Image (cartoon, rainbow, N blue to C red):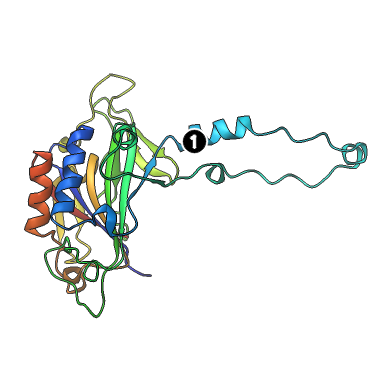
Amino acid sequence: MGLYYAHYLIPLDNSFRPEPERIAALIDALTAARFIPRPEAGDGPTYFLDDWRREAAERATSAAQEPPKPWWKRIFGSATPTRTNLLDLVDIDRPFAVPLTEESFAALADRAVTVGWTIEDPLADGLAYPFEQSPSRDDPPNYRLLIEASEDFRAETINHYDGTGAVDPHCRCGEDLSYARAPFEDVAIRRLCPSCGSSYQPREKLVTFTNGATGESQTIHGGICYRFAVVIDCEKSIPPAIEDGKEGKLSRRFLDACSEALGVELYELGSYS
């Protein structure tokens, strides 16, 4: 079983979600620091909205009705029709314009949005690697740099191998606020409790987990639970430090670019699966 790794940079106030203008400033800062390519440097970023089901439903409803079956098919029956996959009715990933257009700002203000850059060989493209330890040129890394913003909280288990590091999704009143977020059944947690009206506070939750690189047990407030995050989705392109049995850390330059643009304090955590 191979190791998949994703690294999260989360506001210390987990409930923080920046305005679109602040996210635009973050994109400018990461571009200026060469962590993401300039628009003219190749394929641009894409974005994905959680409201894909609404668009797919609209397309399915407006589709032409199936023509009436011949009398002999009505009598003797026919093969069960294949059920249409809603994902086939809509483009999940859409081009995200940089510099930001009116559509880009509207996407960043949506209920839930993910903007992503695919980085296949940062060294060859003249980009800076976001982690502290530089990779080998003989084995160039590839990853996705994601900016995620959501109305509700998104949550991730820190260590999927032993199931540690999942934040408790219950309200103070005991209500379970978790639900499956479309389309890939990721875990989300309601920001407001439908039973008592209280705001969910991830920082009140102590999360204990096993560090997948060092094997040490750690405890942290909030875990990987956020309304906004910058994510380095490495998949199997593991950062060098983790391959050496150390904890993966983002470079100071990357951390400064993000914190200064957002104007908030941040913390980082990795997820192993």
Decide which of 89, 180 is in the foreground and name it.
Answer: 89
Q: Position of residue 180 (x, y in %)?
A: 41, 39
Decide which of 134, 161 is in the foreground and name it.
Answer: 134
Q: Position of residue 137 (x, y in %)?
A: 21, 77
Q: Give the quadrant of the N terminus.
A: bottom left
Decide which of 127, 165 is in the foreground and name it.
Answer: 127
* Residue located farthest toward the top when viewing the structure as drawn: 196
Residue 169 shows in this picture:
no
Q: Is residue 168 left or right of residue 254?
A: right
Residue 56 shows in this picture:
yes
| Circle 1: residue type | Arg
* Residue located farthest toward the front when viewing the structure as drawn: 40
Q: Position of residue 19 (x, y in %)?
A: 20, 32
Which of the 4 quarters of the picture holds residue 194? top left
Is residue 68 depicted above or below 93 in this figure?
A: above
Which of the 4 quarters of the picture holds residue 139? bottom left
Residue at the image position 26 percent from the left and 24 percent from the top: 173
Q: Badge 1: few (under 14), some or many (20 or more) residues near its Cα, within 10 Å?
A: some
Residue at the image position 14 percent from the left and 53 percent from the top: 32
Count numbered badges in the picture: 1
Residue at the image position 17 percent from the left and 74 percent from the top: 244
Q: Secondary structure at mark 1?
A: helix
Q: Give the quadrant of the C terminus.
A: bottom left
Which of the 4 quarters of the picture holds residue 120? bottom left
Q: Is residue 167 left or right of residue 90?
A: left
Is residue 222 depicted above or below 233 in this figure?
A: above
Q: Position of residue 91 (x, y in %)?
A: 48, 45
Which residue position is annotated with label 1? Answer: 53
